[in-house]
Amino acid sequence: MGQASAELERSEDTRRTPVLSASSIAMSFGATQAIRQVDLDLYRGEVHALLGGNGAGKSTLVKILLGALRPTKGSLAVEGEATSFRSVRHAISKGIFPIYQHLSQFPDLTVRENLAAFSLGMARGMLASKAMPSDEVMRGWLSEVGLTLSLDALCRELSIGEMQLLEIARAIAQEAKVLVLDEPTAALTHAESEVLLQTIDKLRARGTAILFISHKLDEVVAVADRLTVIRDGVCAISGAVMEDISTRDIVLAMVGKDVAPITDIAPHKDDVVVAIRDLRLRQGAEPVHFEVARGEVVGLAGIVGSGADRIAEAIAGALEPVSGVVMIEETAVRAGRRKEAVANGIGFVPTDRHADGVFSILGVLQNTSAASHGLISRWGFLRKRQEHRQAHEILERIGLFPFRFEFEAADFSGGNQQKLVVARNLLIDGLKLLVMCEPTRGVDVAARRAIHEVVLEASQRGVCVIVASSDIDELLSICHRVLIVQDQAITGAFARGAQRQDIIGALAGAAA
Ligand SMILES: Nc1ncnc2c1ncn2[C@@H]1O[C@H](COP(=O)(O)OP(=O)(O)OP(=O)(O)O)[C@@H](O)[C@H]1O
């Protein structure tokens, strides 16, 4: 056999041996069997999507692959060699890298220092400038992920998209074999998501294996070569080639039923119930004024940093603006006062459910009825049966999984915690205005549809809704009107029926 053909055979062997494989993995948390039996193989140069409904076991599997959890059963192998990861650091040393959306970098250091920190093991306090890789080498890493940043830029000044790409650049610098991206586009703008997906394409071409976890099916279809779907802790689809499988089959495997997006919504009544007046997030900013009619759903669309979410937070009283009043019928509620907002029937689903959404150590009932005690109490006593019935109804509808009321919120997966927060707000006593930021981030396709339905039902009962979302399809599907936010001010408006491209165009214009 000639040298060339021996090499070819060796390289084909490398292709055939998974770079990372997980066999017969099972994982229990006490009585909860999060994973019953899952197998997953990742090959060089492939993008492998991992999908599943909320609570299916994706994050648990990812933690096992990254060395953050030890499986109860099963085994892992890196390039054919059986391995048992002792820690995340150990997995990284074998070339398996997590890519986080938030920063695992040092925000007060420069891009140069952050890139050097990883290659020099700065965690151990050894940043020695003479041993740093050259600027030219570092620029090479940045250009591989399409970043044109100055090496002197401070990391805290980067956008979320840039930080994520910088994380990938650091992994490339470490010759990562596998990158694990868990919902990587959740906090990115449309344009940033495109850049990330292009970068993933490039990484695939250079032989990196990528595990891509997402609830956004269009993204998965666009980027993945193969996919695995987990349902109830087992593989419903195992490593199927994307071309062989339809979106409908994927949805059926994930949630067991067809889920069509909402295509038509009922009109709202014309009388104005809510008026936002003179809202300024900073001195000298253009004031925000807009009105919401009874039962109207108004979307706020903006690129990251535009202030769309902050305007929503100020209206809900979660963030104190420089000035602003929310008129609800005849009552003036000062923007930025959460207690006043709650007392006047303003509900709020925050972007960050961990920071101020879910009550981790409380149970399902306390989490869902925390804001509705007036409605279900009589003579000062909670009417337990009614509390239970209300929570039961809405949580069943939006598919809480597992449907276990004895669980504390922290025992649920991320998407299921989000369902608790949404349910609590829909059950608010005398709800007049529901303000939501990224209401369906991290929830599966069936729950997303159900959340949209219950929000629209609330709107039909006359509740006004303001939704700040980076998900344009979400805004187009449930809003009567979408406002474009630029630099903390409203710069445009689209009525229902607007095209996706028009909104993207307006946002891109806002970015210019
Ligand atoms: N630390 C824990 N203690 C108890 N149960 C847990 C723990 N972590 C996860 N679980 C349970 O394991 C199951 C799988 O959760 P996991 O977070 O892996 O789901 P997921 O597929 O990532 O869901 P999501 O899409 O909502 O993030 C769920 O039933 C969850 O309630």
Image (cartoon, rainbow, N blue to C red):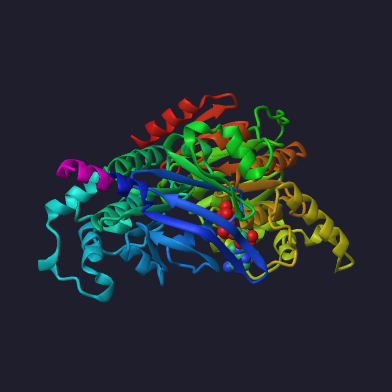
Q: Does the magenta-highlighted stretch encompass residue 361?
A: no
- Direction from residue 422 to residue 130 in the image, left or right: left
| Image coordinates for residue 296, horizontal then vertical, percent | 67, 35
Q: Nearer the viewer, residue 53 or 440?
A: 53
Residue name at image x 42 percent, y 38 percent? 223
Q: Main secondary structure of the magenta part?
A: helix
Q: Nearer the viewer, residue 159 or 200?
A: 200
In the rendered image, which quarter contains the N terminus? top left
Residue 412 in sight: no
What residue sits 52% from the left and 30% below the top?
A: 493
Count the labels in the image.
0
Asked where in the image residue 330 lies, by quadrant, the reply is top right
Give x and y (percent) for residue 156: 32, 58
Left or right, residue 252 beside residue 168: right
Quarter occupied by residue 417: bottom right
Q: Quadrant of ligand 1?
A: bottom right
**Residue farthest to the left, as pictured:** 130
Quadrant where the image shows the C terminus: top left
- Name the residue at the front extreme: 1
Q: Is residue 17 in view from this perspective?
A: yes
* Depth check, front residue: 499 or 167: 167
Nearer-the-camera pick, 451 or 349: 451
Q: Tell me the magenta residue range.
A: 1-11
Residue under the image location 48 percent in, 35 percent down: 242
Q: Position of residue 52 (x, y in %)?
A: 58, 48
Q: Position of residue 50 (x, y in %)?
A: 50, 48
